[in-house]
Image: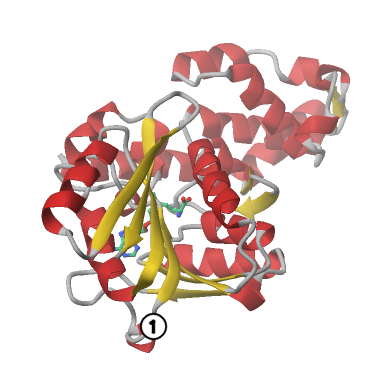
Amino acid sequence: MLKSFTFDTFKLRSATKQIFGTHQHYCALNDNQSHGQSVEVRKALEGWDEKLKEAGVGDIEFNLKCLVAHVLKRKFSTLKSYKTEKFTAQQHSEFSRLCEARCARMPLQHILGEWDFMDLTLKTAPTVFIPRPETEEFVSKVIEEYRSVKQPIDMLEVGCGSGAISLAILNALPQVTSTAIERSKVATTLAWENAKFLKLSDRFTPYNHTTSKNNYLPKELANRKFDLIVSNPPYVRTEEFPLLQPEVTLYENLNALDGGSDGLQIARLVFDLACLHLRPGGKLWLELGSEHPPLVKTIMNLQYEGRLRFISGYIDQYKRDRFVEIEKV
Ligand SMILES: C[S@@+](CC[C@H](N)C(=O)[O-])C[C@H]1O[C@@H](n2cnc3c(N)ncnc32)[C@H](O)[C@@H]1O
């Protein structure tokens, strides 16, 4: 099954490459065609609604407005009656190019190159996991739990991706210091870039490391104990992949999603890691799939008794059981 995804990814990524690769030619064509004249956004939008619908893109109005705001270098929220705005000829061809990429189901977040997560704007990069809205709920829950704690909190994040979780927590809670590990080199670099850009890098240390059995943390951290571990590990069951949107299967790194046959393959590594690297009384917080919290409770009771204790599961805004809190005994 994974083989066919690799093939599709290749096909679609090269389609997107073609769109972006032909940019100069495309611009030249449009500049000549429009003789450098400005175009009303309403006119530039013509036809894209149908093309995006045909490509299977949802929430088209939102997508188009985001792209218009991006091309005009304006904040989405300040662009009210955007259809009466004007594009220069160059902006018009840029807009068409971005719409083509969206028709190829390239995620909006990758097209724009940045995305808001809680109070932060994070840079995005192809292949690096795009932070999801439900993760904002997860992070808010963790922040509320620790807001009143006055002493320093030494936190570890497993699989930091773009840095969204760590950086949002660091931004909200000055008493936290975060160490993060991440298997993807590109993601580790992006997380560090985001930390520097947001001026949070003095409390953030990311390592490019893949957690595996008996090699949970990089050598430098072998003796470290933490007060708090957070993770949004890959938790999609391998068999669920055909149900995912093309934006996910074609443009996201499968290592960021694939949680194995029951979705808990990486979470189990994090449980073992927590046994070794959490201080007694320290907490492990995980974002998981909706079927996982009851399963995790059973696993804690059967396999981790005397080491880890299941405290609670929490629901997201859609009333799905999604987040778990576990304590080191
Ligand atoms: C679901 S993404 C979450 C990313 C980020 N924390 C967020 O919420 O946006 C999971 C991340 O874990 C990383 N990852 C997967 N397996 C890992 C492992 N064994 N060790 C370290 N990182 C891993 C992936 O590369 C990916 O960036």
Q: Position of residue 105 (x, y in %)?
A: 46, 31
Location of residue 153 with respect to 78 vertically, above or below: below
* Horizontal side of residue 49 vs 259, given as left or right: right
- Image quadrant assignment for residue 279: bottom left
Mark 1, secondary structure of its residue: loop
- Identity of the residue drawn at 65% across and 23% down: 62
* Horizontal side of residue 323 vs 267, given as left or right: right
Quadrant for the N terminus in the image: top left
Q: Position of residue 133 (x, y in %)?
A: 53, 37
- Residue type at mark 1? Arg
Split into quadrants, the picture shows ligand 1 in the one at: bottom left
State yes or no: Cβ of the residue under disc 1 lies below 8 Å from any atom of ligand 1. no
- Identity of the residue drawn at 52% across and 51% down: 142
- Identity of the residue drawn at 57% across and 57% down: 146
Residue indicated by mark 1: 224
Location of residue 4 with respect to 328 vertically, above or below: above
Front position in the image: 97 or 22 = 97
Q: Position of residue 163 (x, y in %)?
A: 53, 60
Front position in the image: 104 or 131 = 131
- Image quadrant assignment for residue 185: bottom left
Camera sees residue 18 = no
Rendering colour mode:
secondary structure
- Identity of the residue drawn at 32% across and 37% down: 289
